[in-house]
Image (tube, rainbow, N blue to C red):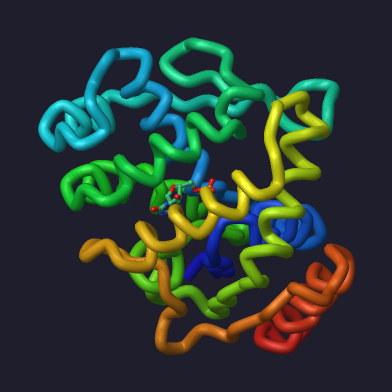
Amino acid sequence: MIPVLAIDGPSGSGKGAVGAAVAHRLGWHYLDSGAVYRALGLAALWAGVACDDGRALTDLAQGLELRFVPGSGDEPAVFVNDRECTTLLRGPEAAAAASQVAVIGSVRTALLARQQAARRPPGLVADGRDMGSHVFPDAFLKIFLTASAEVRAQRRYDQLKAKGFSVTLPKLIGEIRERDERDINRPVAPLKPARDAVVLDSSDLGLNDVIDRVVAMVEGRLGS
Ligand code: DC
């Protein structure tokens, strides 16, 4: 059985940075499932499909082409339906669209096999909202990474500023609360820790501390 480490949590909890770094340390594959929903959100905006049109979004999800092309920078270039959108994918527009398309059950089903296909030897680190609860229920370790809304907004602010987006902290705090609300209260695959998840609050921890703790937990479970 190929081992899966599931890292779930709200926006800005640091699960992306932690997941990618832990995958790198272990030499495992990495799935950024949020990128899949963001890609669909962008594809919908480009195609003029409303973010609540379930049937059209499901068709779009089935035909979605998402490619990560490693380049010279830290992050790979991202192509959605052959359109380069590396920066756009990380922006607030894609985030808002992703959060809306993600509430539709048939869209989630259409994207399930694509996410599960990322499980390849020697192992997978998967980050998102429902990795431990739905996509990889047999993950050997499930971590629910969280932090206060203020800390998460500050992290997002720093990231987006560095990428050249024009954002303000109060607006980001509002957006994060709004997105949490939608992600937590949706009937399909709501954002909540899996029953057997370890909850890790990173509000007062630096990135490297979180990475070290997660790697230690993995090694503890795998017995290496
Ligand atoms: O992690 P992120 O900010 O890139 O996620 C963007 C949106 O996608 C988020 O609002 C909820 C949705 N999402 C989801 O519903 N399920 C996942 N496994 C990953 C993301």
Q: Quadrant of residue 208?
A: bottom right
Q: Look at the image and tell me whether residue 4 can be seen.
A: no
Horizontally, is 133 left or right of 204 in the view? left
Picture residue at 57% right of the left edge, 13% below the top? 84
Above or below, 60 against 191 in this view is: above
Above or below, 181 against 157 in this view is: below
| Nearer to the camera, 221 or 135 | 135
Picture residue at 49% right of the left edge, 46% below the top? 34
Q: Quadrant of residue 43?
A: top left
| Nearer to the camera, 219 or 176 | 176
Q: Look at the image and tell me whether residue 53 can be seen.
A: yes
> How many callouts does the rendering have?
0
Percent from the top left, x then y, of residue 223? 72, 88
Q: Quadrant of the C terminus?
A: bottom right
Above or below, 60 against 124 in this view is: above
Q: Residue furthest left?
A: 55
Percent from the top left, x then y, of residue 192? 42, 75
| Nearer to the camera, 172 or 132 | 172
Percent from the top left, x then y, of residue 6? 54, 68
Picture residue at 50% right of the left edge, 59% below the top? 177
Above or below, 5 against 224 in this view is: above
Picture residue at 75% right of the left edge, 61% below the top? 22
Percent from the top left, x then y, of residue 27? 75, 55
Q: Residue furthest front?
A: 170
Horizontally, is 176 left or right of 147 in the view? left
Horizontally, is 205 left or right of 35 in the view? right
